[in-house]
């Protein structure tokens, strides 16, 4: 059986999802781990059975036994490391977002176009069971032409702090961290049309809400309640070249009664809610229908999503399949996110 030899760069929380999925894939062999903290690199390599640990990504990229790499580092290094890996001859799975800005994404896309390497973006929710099922209905024409979508990911008190709250490292706040997931799901199910205009707002009203002590929250290792320069929330109307439109809102901090996740698409033959639960709406015989597909997971399941993402990446590296999240789509997503931030900064709709 042909195998792809894997190196993983970064040993934070998201790297654990990649490592677990690679370990569970019989066609992937984990051979190397890299982290700027050499002790962490060594400990992670030992934990997951990798034979080599590096503290410099360049050394891992130069390793002739490594065929492909997962880049699981901070956002400010995604494009730089992906470019270096491709130029070293490696296939690349780069975590979302593929960069902090569209300009960075363009540089990576140019390198991808000049090399015969697979570069896949970590839009893991595309690989979830509910998305796979709904995509099969859409591809079969059951929903007709998708012309409208809604994407919402609302956290009341969900700023993780640390590098997530540092715009120079992260590129932004909830929009680029969690909003990107729901925007991408809608855009993917809409058929990835090209963006033409964005009208958006961002707000910095509540901060990281470190004053709230009665509820638990996720905090990264370098959490500092005094440091935060990213937006609390963002909303946008996004238009595409096929006439379709997408409404989006997302937040780290918002006076909302509950946290919520909504992903919905609407076509001329039917519509669907993907999140929080997959349901498909249509009509037959002058009657409205609501269909609930019977699948193992109502919503996103972490292990299932990463398992299928890694399988798609491995198959693409072996030339057996096309990546369902290629680099150009990661770059187009950065164009959308840049449009949101630009429109909000200018206080008006921007043409893309």
Image: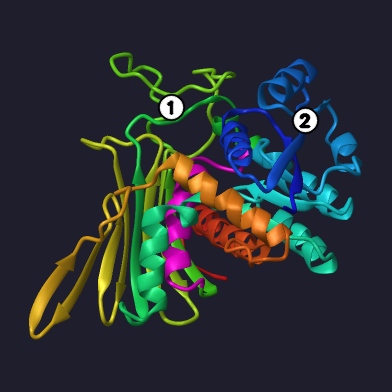
230 left or right of 270 in image: right
Give how far apart the Cα atoms at labels 1 and 2 are.
31 Å
Q: Earlier in the sequence, mark 1 or mark 2?
A: 2
Q: Which residue is mark 1?
A: 208
Residue at image location 40% in from the left, 43% down from the top: 301
Which of the pair 113/297 is nearer the observer? 297
Whether the magenta-drawn stretch holds residue 178 is answered as yes
Q: Secondary structure at mark 1?
A: loop
Residue at image location 75% in from the left, 53% down from the top: 2
Q: Specify the quadrant of the image occupied by residue 73.
A: top right
Q: In the rendering, at what x and y percent does residue 119 appear?
A: 71, 58
Which of the pair 77/94 is nearer the observer? 94
Q: Specify the quadrant of the image occupied by residue 253.
A: top left
338 left or right of 294 in image: right
Q: Secondary structure at mark 2?
A: strand
Whether the magenta-drawn stretch holds residue 37 is answered as no
Crowd around label 1: few <14 · some 14–19 · many ≥20 (10 Å): many
Q: In the rendering, at what x and y percent does residue 32 appear?
A: 78, 33
Visible in this render: residue 122?
A: no
Q: Which residues are magenta?
A: 170-192
Crowd around label 2: few <14 · some 14–19 · many ≥20 (10 Å): many
Q: Which residue is mark 2?
A: 34
Locate the C terminus by quadrant. bottom right
Q: In the rendering, at what x and y percent does residue 349 appear?
A: 47, 66
Residue at image location 47% in from the left, 75% down from the top: 240
């Amino acid at each position: 059986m042909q195998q792809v030899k894997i190196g993983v760069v970064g040993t934070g929380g998201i790297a654990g999802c990649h490592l677990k999925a690679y370990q569970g894939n019989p066609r992937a062999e984990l051979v190397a781990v890299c982290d700027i903290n050499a002790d962490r690199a060594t400990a992670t390599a030992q934990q997951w059975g990798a034979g080599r640990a590096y503290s410099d990504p360049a050394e891992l990229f130069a390793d002739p036994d490594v065929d492909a790499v997962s880049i699981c580092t901070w956002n400010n290094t995604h494009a730089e490391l992906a470019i270096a890996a491709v130029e070293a001859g490696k296939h690349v799975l780069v975590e979302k977002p593929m960069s902090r800005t569209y300009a960075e994404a363009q540089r990576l896309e140019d390198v991808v176009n000049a090399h015969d390497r697979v570069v896949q973006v970590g839009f893991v929710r595309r690989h979830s069971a509910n998305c796979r099922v709904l995509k099969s209905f859409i591809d079969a024409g059951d929903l007709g032409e998708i012309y409208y979508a809604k994407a919402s990911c609302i956290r009341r008190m969900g700023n993780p702090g640390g590098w997530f709250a540092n715009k120079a490292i992260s590129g932004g706040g909830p929009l680029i961290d969690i909003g990107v997931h729901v925007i991408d799901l809608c855009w993917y199910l809409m058929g990835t049309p090209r963006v033409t205009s964005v009208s958006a707002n961002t707000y910095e009203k509540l901060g990281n809400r470190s004053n709230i002590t009665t509820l638990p929250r996720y905090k990264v290792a370098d959490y500092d309640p005094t440091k935060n320069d990213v937006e609390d929330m963002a909303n946008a109307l996004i238009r595409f070249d096929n006439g379709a439109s997408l409404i989006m809102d997302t937040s780290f901090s918002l006076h909302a009664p509950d946290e919520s996740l909504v992903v919905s698409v609407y076509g001329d033959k039917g519509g669907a809610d993907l999140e929080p639960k997959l349901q498909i709406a249509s009509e037959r015989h002058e009657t409205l229908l609501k269909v609930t597909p019977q699948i193992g997971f109502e919503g996103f399941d972490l292990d299932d999503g990463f398992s299928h993402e890694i399988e798609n990446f491995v198959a693409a590296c072996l030339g057996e399949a096309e990546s369902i999240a290629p680099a150009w789509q990661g770059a187009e997503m950065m164009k959308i996110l840049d449009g949101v931030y630009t429109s909000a900064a200018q206080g008006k709709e921007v043409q893309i």
